[in-house]
Amino acid sequence: MADLHDVIIEPVLSEKATALREEGKYVFKVQPSATKIQIKEAVSKLFNVKVRSCTTLNVLGKVKRVRGKVGRTSNWKKAIVRLAPGETIKIFEGV
């Protein structure tokens, strides 16, 4: 991975992700080839926070139907990043 911005694609803004935020955990959509160490480094440098741990999981795409044709959404990788106590990511406070 060349750039920190290439590791993290976007934050996940779901109801479950919002509930996890209260526990100090933040959820991001990341590159499928990204490792836990790269994700920790990217989050800590981009948001100036101390990362405690990182959990990753591969999310399988869902089967969808559009006008009778069966298709599939893309697979993607999710990272749940746990911050040190007292740390927060400021961009999520208004969401």
Image (cartoon, rainbow, N blue to C red):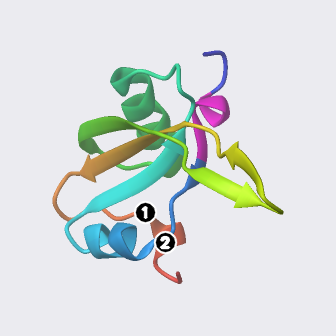
Residue at horizontal 63%, vertical 39%?
A: 74
Residue at horizontal 46%, vertical 79%?
A: 93
Mark linked to residue 67 = none
Kindly indicate the quadrant of the structure image that contains residue 18. bottom left
Residue placed farthest to the right in the image? Answer: 67
Q: Secondary structure at mark 2?
A: helix
- Find residue 65 and report its horizontal and vertical position in percent: 70, 58
Which residue matches tag 1?
A: 89
**Crowd rating for badge 2 (residues with CA inside 10 Å; few <14, some 14–19, many 20+):** few
Q: Secondary structure at mark 1?
A: loop
Residue placed farthest to the front in the image? Answer: 68
Kindly indicate the quadrant of the structure image that contains residue 54. top left
Give the vertical position of 55 relative to 35 (above or below). below
Type of amino acid at the residue the image marks with label 1? Ile
- Find residue 20 and report its horizontal and vertical position in percent: 27, 67
Would residue 33 appear left or right of 26 to someone viewing this image? right
Residue at horizontal 46%, vertical 71%?
A: 14
Type of amino acid at the residue the image marks with label 2? Phe
Q: Is residue 84 magenta?
A: no
Residue placed farthest to the left in the image? Answer: 85
Tell me the magenta residue range: 4-9
Q: Is residue 5 magenta?
A: yes
Disc 2 from disc 1: Cα separation: 6 Å
Q: Nearer the viewer, residue 4 or 50?
A: 4
Most prominent secondary structure in the magenta stretch? helix
Residue at horizontal 48%, vertical 72%?
A: 92
Kindly indicate the quadrant of the structure image that contains residue 75. top right
Would residue 81 appear left or right of 1 to someone viewing this image? left
- Find residue 1 and report its horizontal and vertical position in percent: 60, 16
**Crowd rating for badge 1 (residues with CA inside 10 Å; few <14, some 14–19, many 20+):** some
Which residue matches tag 2?
A: 92
Q: Are marks 2 and 1 in contact (CB under 8 Å)?
A: yes
